[in-house]
Image: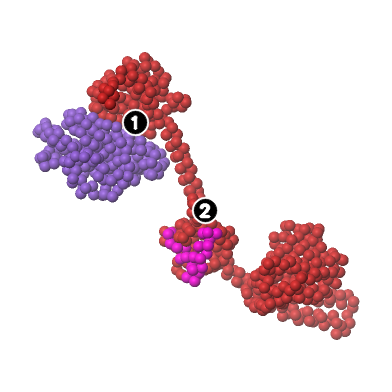
Amino acid sequence: MSELSEIEHDALTEIANMAVGRSAGVLNEMIGLEVALSVPRVLILDQSNLPEHVGNLQGKELTLIQQGFDGPLSGLASIAFPEHKSLELVRLLLGEEMSLEEVVELEQEALQEMGNVILNSFLGTFGNEFGVNISSEIPKFHKDMDAHSLIGDTGETGVSVIFIHVDFCVRAENIDGYLVLAVSIPTMKNLETLVKSYVEKLG
Amino acid sequence: MDEFEKSTFSSTEISLLLDEIKVGLMLVENDNRIAYANTWFQEACGRTQDALRGATLETVFPMLSSGRLMGAVDEALNAQRSTLLTNKLNKNLFPLRCSSGPEMQQRVTIRPFGAARCLIQIEDVTDTYEREKILKRKRKETETDRAYLDAILQGTAEGIVTIDAQGLIETFNTAAEQIFGYSAPEVVGQNVSILMPLEERGGHDNYLKNSVLHEPRIINNAREITGQRKLGNKFPMELNVSRAELAERVVFIGIIRDITKQKEVERLKTEFVSTVSHELRTPLTSIKGALALLATGAFGGLPEDGMDLIKIAEKNSQRLIVLVNDILDMEKLESGEIEFEMQPLNLSKLISEAVEVNDGFAKQYEVKFNNSPCDGDLTVVGDESRLTQVLANFLSNAAKFSMIGMTIEIYVERYEDAARVMIKDQGPGIPEEFQDSLFDRFTQVDGSDTRKKGGSGLGLNISKLIVEKHGGDIGFSSEVGVGSIFYFTLPTV
């Protein structure tokens, strides 16, 4: 990400912040309870640097929802439910008494749909802010994945990753946990161009 | 190959292909008008292609306006984003029915199709939905059952410990925690021998090895063993083990009762009875002696009525002495205070002598003993006087309860390594309701009979203790109105 100036980097972080905020709004609506999201930790890095940043995801079996996106920006967007705690959100969503094992086992569809809603609103924010259309595909469900699966198997080098860690808390239900979003973008040049013109417009 | 690559399909053929597909397909224009719906979809919604084509989604399916579907169509048409809508999170999907009738559970995907259209794809997931419903219900039932069983397990007053075939503890209930002083997490996964004193551990390991392969001996049969608490102190416990085969493995369920208090009460009771009996025997002996002297007329004659009273008093003091002696005997036998003088004995000779000695009884009750000698010698190892006591008890009982003129048969049944002594009477028989308690203390079939026939009601209990000390068993069979056969079995040499 050396190609981005500090201001441009900040702008990208800010857009990611906004995207998370919008996703939180969508989550609230779906669950019917206030889901508080922390200020996200946003990292923009090269895929080769990902391992040192996945930190507490290391060695975890992740439940992943991934969807491809295309347009001026293309790549793979992932949402990870790293711990059983994260899956509590889905249980809330379903409003059913069920064990978390059952959530993963029986509610893949619900998880997939929830991930789809969050990722679409996330990608939508990027599209809106950059003033471009980012199309998305139907999400896919993967379980028992490791942290490297977050960026998918691009088969390419030089892939950039927007890595976002956000804590959530549903006070009414005394549930807290965290989610991880990763957006991998092989077409870095395009992202740079979009960010630069975004900053120019602001300026 | 080349020809194959060149082959193309006509639009009619493609349309026919789409109509064969078992999912619903619908193309929607950017003004929300339906451009195409395949046969599957037409059938599921009960409308023809003509009724669908050209109409807007919201006019054909007004219910969609309250769900997320229209928003997703909008997003696909205007922002090129794909959306998944499932039956899990959406109430208002298409009003479709399965061909078998019920409302269809759907998985709907909406994605951009070209620049100005979107493709809606509908899958019928009713079967999966029903299967999941059954699965969830079953799971819930299993959970409820488990909670129910756990409540019983934890709520019961008996300690319950389950172990696997290696002797490792799997569960340890609340009562077990209280008995042993360990918490469940402390012992689960440990060998069960930590609940026993060191000297009993080896024995238990062998026992377990045998039990895995065969039905263990103490299954469903309580036995008393020594347990050891966390702090190291030993205590008497009653253990009842059962064996269960669960999903191709063996588990053992031990039910434990701490009998420390019970043992203490028993000890106190025995001590009390023994003390009281001793204290009673001395004055009783002198009363009986004095009465006997009076009865002989050594101190001058008494009026006839007075003499009758003295004789009644003498007879009853004798009965009291017998009772006190029996009680002392029984307590001594139970506490193991009595040493048995074990020696080889000729069983036939033992029986003959006993019959002879008790012949007075037969005369008194006007019955006959008929002793059928057994063929050859039978040797048992035992205490002569104690076994004679058992025989006397059986013979006197038979005499007492037989009717005048009847014969009592005495005979021996031989087995490979045991002999059974049988005493068959023609008495009134033992009613079924008394049969279970016959060998208990102070049992006589009819309370009103006691005075008529005499006896402490301890004879059979004492006999049982004696026979068991010899490694034998004791029992009877009886039919009301026909008679009874009392027997005891002893191992032969």
Badge 1, how many Cα within 10 Å: few under 14, some, many 20+? many
Q: Position of residue B417 (x, y in %)?
A: 67, 68
Which stretch appears magenta?
B187-214
User: Tag 1: residue type?
Assistant: Leu
Residue A3 appears in view: yes
Q: Position of residue B408 (x, y in %)?
A: 81, 67
Report whether B48 appears left or right of B402. Answer: left
Answer with the quarter of the image where residue A170 lies. top left
Image quadrant where one finds the N terminus of chain A: top left
- Pointer 2: what residue? B245
Q: Colour of chain A?
A: purple
Q: Nearer the viewer, residue B221 or A14?
A: B221
Is residue A6 one of those drawn in magenta? no
Q: Residue at x 32, y 44 (%)?
A: A144
Q: Which mark is residue B85?
A: 1
Q: Residue at x 52, y 53 (%)?
A: B245
Badge 2, how many Cα within 10 Å: few under 14, some, many 20+? few
Q: Position of residue A135 (x, y in %)?
A: 23, 30
SS at mark 2?
strand
Report whether B260 appears left or right of B355. Answer: left
Q: Nearer the viewer, residue B413 or A167?
A: B413
SS at mark 1?
strand
Give the red chain's letter: B
Which of disc 1 and disc 2 is earlier in sequence? 1
Q: Residue at x 49, y 52 (%)?
A: B248
Q: Disc 2 and disc 1: Cα gap in Å?
A: 47 Å
